[in-house]
Image (cartoon, coloured by chain):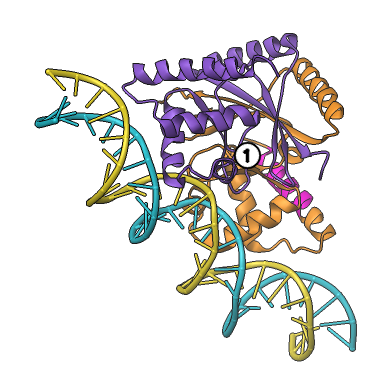
Chain colours: A purple, B orange, C cyan, D yellow
Amino acid sequence: MPGDTDHLSEIHLEIGSRLARQDHRYTTGRRHLVSVLAQAGQPMTLPDIVTADPDLAQSSVYRNLDVLVRSGVIRRISAGGDHTHFELAEPLLGHHHHLICISCGGIEDIHLDSEVEMLVDQSLTDIASRSGFTPIHHSLDLHGHCADC
Amino acid sequence: MPGDTDHLSEIHLEIGSRLARQDHRYTTGRRHLVSVLAQAGQPMTLPDIVTADPDLAQSSVYRNLDVLVRSGVIRRISAGGDHTHFELAEPLLGHHHHLICISCGGIEDIHLDSEVEMLVDQSLTDIASRSGFTPIHHSLDLHGHCADC
DNA sequence: CAATATTTGGGAATGAGTGTCATTCGCAAG
DNA sequence: CTTGCGAATGACACTCATTCCCAAATATTG
């Protein structure tokens, strides 16, 4: 797959500058964590992550996930299973939604027609303003059974 | 508010028959649990529930929430805060979505235009069938800050 | 290189949620 | 209305995902 390496280094550059802006260091461990998430291409749990790169220490991964979530670089997904899922944030991955399997807990990314997307966003914005609610982002998940379950 | 008592007893009747169909009993404790959720009119956490009715025992509430979720009477909502939220399931409450406050963890119910709702549902169904995914229900949440935060 | 601040990682601590089990309850048959 | 029995209860022990702690290691600044 040509271009992949470039894409990954773009991501690293972008994340590095975001972290620098907030006085955080983009260390080797954080870089590896981001690489694992970027290469997986789908949301991962903590066990997924340390399995993919066993050099990563559990406590550091949890701590770094937290730092990166706070920095807007990683997104936390609570799907109801035992473990929380994490993926690169939307500025890096583009806006999308999820298919969540209620049997195996797996999560897959999906994309909606931009037409439908805009309608939804508009509706939600209207509703929010009526309640004095300040929207930050929305999530739309389809729960069911994946092809393997 | 005229009609409320009737609405509550309708709910109890409906739940009673659903439980009976699955060889479960609609005991006093379960009835109280359902009453608390019905009267709150918004998703509640376990502490919310036992605070609202201190006669309810924590372990029994957890166990009964599980039974009622399995019976399709209560819906479990994982919003990312410390505690899971619960509310009456959609057959009883009607289809709706949520405003989730990322400061205080509070959740409020909202309703989308049925037009938008159908479009979303159609899109999701299409996407799901393309992946061999069997849809059960979707969730659409708007995350942000509520009026009080 | 020295001084300073951030990060690391192993293990202990926390706490939401689940399991256990003796007691109690609810229902149905007599 | 009693009795019998499987389901439900509740106090408490336990599990395990996640967070906390802190001494050692590493990065940045002067």
Left or right, residue B92 beside residue B149: right
Give the residue type that dot 1 points to: Ala
Does B62 sit above or below residue A33? below
Please state the horizontal and vertical placement of residue B50, each as a whole percent of the image: 50, 54
The answer to if B116 sits in the magenta stretch is no
Q: Quadrant of residue A86?
A: top right
Does C14 sit above or below residue A2? below
| Residue position marked by numbered label 1 in the rendering | A79
Does residue B57 appear anywhere in the picture?
no
Pinpoint the chain carrying mark 1: A
Would you call the spot at circle 1 few (<14 residues within 10 Å), some (14-19), or many (20 or more)? Answer: many
Does B80 sit above or below residue B31? above
* Residue at x-position 45% and y-position 45%: A57
Label count reads 1
Q: Callout 1: helix, strand or loop?
A: loop
Does residue B45 appear anywhere in the picture?
yes
Please state the horizontal and vertical placement of residue A105, each as a whole percent of the image: 69, 43
Please state the horizontal and vertical placement of residue C1, each as a whole percent of the image: 14, 30
Left or right, residue A16 beside residue B79: left
Does B148 sit above or below residue B16? above
From the viewer's side, name the closer residue of B124 and A63.
Answer: A63
Query: Magenta residues, as a range?
Result: B3-15
